[in-house]
Amino acid sequence: MAKIKIATDWLAACAGCHMSLLDLDERLVQLLDKIEITSSPITDLKYPPREGVTVGILTGTVNNTAHLEVARVMRERCQILVSLGDCSVLGGVPLMRNQVKMEDALRRAYVETESTVDGLIPRSEELAQPIFARPLDQVVKVDVYLPGCPPSADAIHFVIGELLEGRIPVLKDQVLKYD
Ligand code: SF4
């Protein structure tokens, strides 16, 4: 039987959600009998293949113009889009940036941080431009939501398992238990 193709990428994220995916450990190895991970932030191939994948998984907040493009391409190339983690589902910590003017946020990040000497705000049309930060479903349609900061490996395993069975996962209390 052909393997189910899964592509994943991150937006404004701390990598914790993908660390949780890697926390599947041996179960990830078992899943690889049934799935092919075509692209991910931790492999050379970043973009999902043009021919498309069954499942796309995005983590992180939509925070700049590059994220808009990543979200749009993933949406176009996947049948089922999973929004994984609080940053993607709810906006998460990066949403705090919306409370201040963009220029103030950039100055704080590139000039005023305690460890910075002679900082400079990068200005180039080649760089992604910051935008009002927002959750993923405010820019593309999302099919499955998996909140958590990060979601547990068990929750991720449940979601992938249900998708492999052809079901849209219904998250019950035990999957969303945080302690
Ligand atoms: S949801 Fe939490 S773990 Fe995931 S990217 Fe955001 S801050 Fe990191």
Image: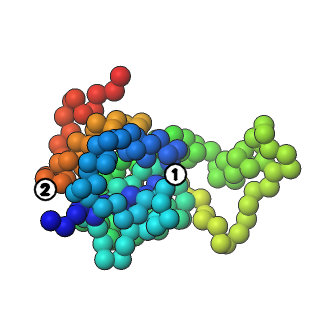
Q: Amino acid at mark 2?
A: Gly
Q: Nearer the viewer, residue 173 or 52?
A: 52
Residue 145: image tag: none
Q: Nearer the viewer, residue 47 or 134?
A: 47
Q: Nearer the viewer, mark 1 or mark 2?
A: 2
Secondary structure state at the residue bearing disc 1: loop
Name, please, the residue furthest toward the top. 179
Q: Quadrant of residue 57?
A: bottom left
Q: Quadrant of the N terminus?
A: bottom left
Identify the residue under disc 1. Answer: 12
Residue 166: image tag: 2
Residue 20: x percent and y percent?
40, 40
Question: What residue is at 13 percent from the left and 53 percent from the top?
Answer: 165
Q: Amino acid at mark 1?
A: Ala
Secondary structure state at the residue bearing disc 2: loop
Scheme by which the image is coloured: rainbow
11 relative position to 1: left or right: right
82 relative position to 98: left or right: left
Confirm or reject: label 1 Cβ below 8 Å from ligand 1: yes
10 Å crowding of disc 2: few (<14), some (14-19), many (20+): few
Name, please, the residue furthest toward the right. 118
- Mark 1 or 2 closer to N-term? 1
Q: Separation of disc 1 and disc 2 at Cα?
A: 30 Å
Compared with residue 11, is residue 46 higher up or lower down, i.e. above or below?
A: below
Question: What residue is at 56 percent from the left and 47 percent from the top?
Answer: 98
101 relative position to 4: left or right: right
Confirm or reject: label 2 Cβ below 8 Å from ligand 1: no
Question: What residue is at 22 percent from the left and 29 percent from the top?
Answer: 174
Does residue 17 appear in this view? no
Residue 52: x percent and y percent?
30, 72
